[in-house]
Each structure stands twice: as C-alpha cells, then as structure tokens.
Amino acid sequence: MNLSNSDRQIAIATGTRADWGLLLPLAQELRTRGHEPLIMATHAHFFDELGMTVNEIIADGFTPACRILTSRVPAEAMADTTVGFAGHLSELQPGALVILGDRFEMLGAASAAVLSNVPIVHIAGGNVTLGAFDNSIRNAISQMATLHLPETDKCGERLASMGIAPERIVVAGSPGVYNALNINLLSLSELEESLHFQLGDDFLLATMHAATLDTVPPLQQMTNFLDGLRIHLNEFPNRRLILTYPNSDSDTTLLIKAIEDFKTEFPERILTIPSLGRVRYLSAAALCRAVIGNSSSGIEETPSLGIPTLDIGNRQSGRERGEGVMHCEGDAESISKALHEVTSERFREIAGKASNPYFKENTPARQADFCLSLL
C-alpha cells in the first residue's frame, strides 16, 4: 500500500517505560532495514521518582531525536504533548508517527500528528479495558490513525466494526509476547545479582496501577491490594515479592509512599523498585510463582512464559485473555483468596499449558512492513 512517495523517516512516540519496551523490537527492525527511527520521548521518561527511564532508551542504543517534557497532571500532560509534538513534528517532518496503545499523553501526540498532516500508525488498537479512561483514549487514537496494527484477531475485527477499512488493518500480534519469547532472559542468580536481592525460588512479581474509572479512589485501591498481600505473605512466610511502582495515570506520590511503608513490614522479603526494565521484568516474570496486579503485561506477555497471572480489579475488564489468567475483585479478602489459588500447583499446571491469543509469528517484521508502506 503506497500512500506516499516520501522518503522521510518513521517517528516513534514513547512516554513510559512500558511502551518503550514494546516499541523497541520495531525500532530495531526498522534500523536493520536501513530506516533509522526518530524516537520522540516524553512524559514519564523524565520523572525521577519513576526511574528517569529515558536512560533505558539510551541504554538500548537509541538517542531520542527530541525530549518533550510535561506536567505530571494527566490533562496538563496531554496539552504539553500536543504542543511539544506539534513543534517537533514540524521540525522533523517524519513520514509517519507510530503510537502504541492508549495513554493520555499519546492522545496529545496523535492530535498534533493529525493537525500536522503526519500519518499515524497505531499499535494495539481494538483492545478493551473498561476500568480505565485508557479505553476511550485508545478508540480516539484509532479513529485518528491511518494504519492499524492490532494484537489479536478479535481486536482487528473490533476495529473493522468501528468503520476502519480492512486493508488498513494488519493483525501483527503483541510486541510484548515477541519480547518474552525472543529476549535472552537472566537466570535466577543473574537476576538476584542485578537486583542485589535474594529472591529464592518462591517469589511473586507485582504491579498495581490506578484503575482510573473505578469508584474506589486510587489510594484505597492500593491499600486493598497491599492488605491482600499482607495476608498472603503472613500465610506463606518463605514467599518473597518484587513490587514495582505504578505508572503516572494518577498522582503517584501517595501510592509510592504506601508501597514503601508496606515494605518496612517485610524488609527482608520485599524488593520495591520504580522500574525493572524490559529484561529484568521478563526474567522475573519467567522465574516467579505468579504475576499479580492489574498490568496488561500479566495478560499479554506472561502467558507465553507459562506463568500464572492474577488480574485484580476492573482496570483490565473486557481485555481478551487466555486460560492462564485468573481474575478477582479488588478487596483484600478476594485478593488473598485468589492468591492462594493462583499460586497453587493445580493452576500453575493450567497456565503452563494455556495458549495465548496475543501471539503471532514475526511481530516486528509485520509491523515494519506496514509502517514502511507509508514511505
């Protein structure tokens, strides 16, 4: 599909540690084909309390073509990215802008691209997450996009039902699943050495973000989560825990304080960390007893590692999932009960055999082919 005769570069927008890890395989694929991508870094990549993850981009061998700083307040951040991307898109003149998912700062980037006449390639449209405002943002970006790279067949069908022409949709699979199956993961001893923390062979990997459309406030969501963990850790005194910080969907100050206060109750058993980075996160996911919380990574990537996931609360409500993913409500009692079940040998056996609807062969190559059709 030749929609343009331009020889311009492909730009890639990234605003968090999570989306960069998912966009890296595409960036590398473009580079191997002689098309150096323009990395447009913004928002949470520049927050000290979240690990200054712009350094992860640099460590992966890519120097951002621009750095767009934003407010920490979601609505203000969206406005900042609209202004920032408008200026840099005018300067860089890319042939297309790749946007992944459903973040509010990416809605600003998409708006700037549309008004700058820069085609958008949207990855992971057609998903459903009814517990967060991400859902409406994702659909808005889909309506602005020129080409679509959904992760599953059902997501592709959902995009078509929104009036998007089938020839503008290629089901490419999840880049996170590609990472999980293709990255050289760390051994337990290597992971422990990297983290300077003894995990042993019985630990959990946890991430709890704010469910922004929940009637329960984010701090209470986190408190309920930690209360459920407390019950579980007291029941299993040898079990350890890696607890990563939430993303910037809401003010993280009180959420991070709650996490750090909780750590003091089990100082030898809990590791808290702003960001593990892609390799350490997937390594921990492959080695742990279960992945827990409400991150999409537990639903998409973890099943391809054969590890159980406990999806908590309504943040990911509506998202397609395999049999290795268990769901529970967000109160402490439900979490404690579900943790007992998801870490059982019975459920671990189920997860080890379950298929993953987010898997497709050669995801980065499929994505690159479609992106380059715009040039």
Image (cartoon, grey):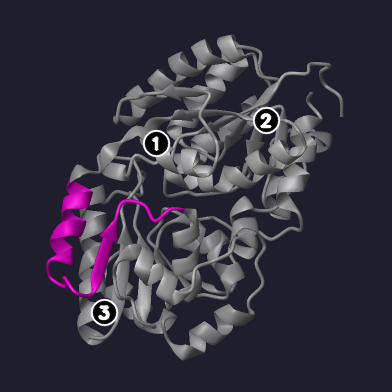
Secondary structure of the residue carrying tag 2 is loop
Q: Is residue 189 left or right of residue 305?
A: left
Question: How far, Cα to Cα, is label 3 from label 1?
Answer: 33 Å
Residue at 13% across, 60% down: 261
Task: Return the mark for residue 163.
Answer: none
Secondary structure of the residue carrying tag 1 is helix
- Work out whether residue 55 or residue 204 is closer to the camera in this orientation and state it: 55
Residue that label 2 marks: 36
Amino acid under disc 2: Glu
Which of the marked residues, 2 or 3, is nearer the chain's N terminus? 2
Q: Give the label, 3 or 1, closer to the camera.
A: 1
Residue at 53% across, 44% down: 60
- Work out whether residue 66 or residue 44 is closer to the camera in this orientation and state it: 66
Amino acid under disc 3: His
What is the x, y in percent for residue 119?
69, 22
Residue that label 3 marks: 232
Residue at 52% across, 31% down: 63
Q: Is residue 129 left or right of residue 260?
A: right
What is the x, y in percent for residue 174?
64, 53
Q: Residues within 10 Å of mark 3 (few under 14, many from 20)?
A: many
Residue that label 1 marks: 45
| Range shown magenta | 254-277
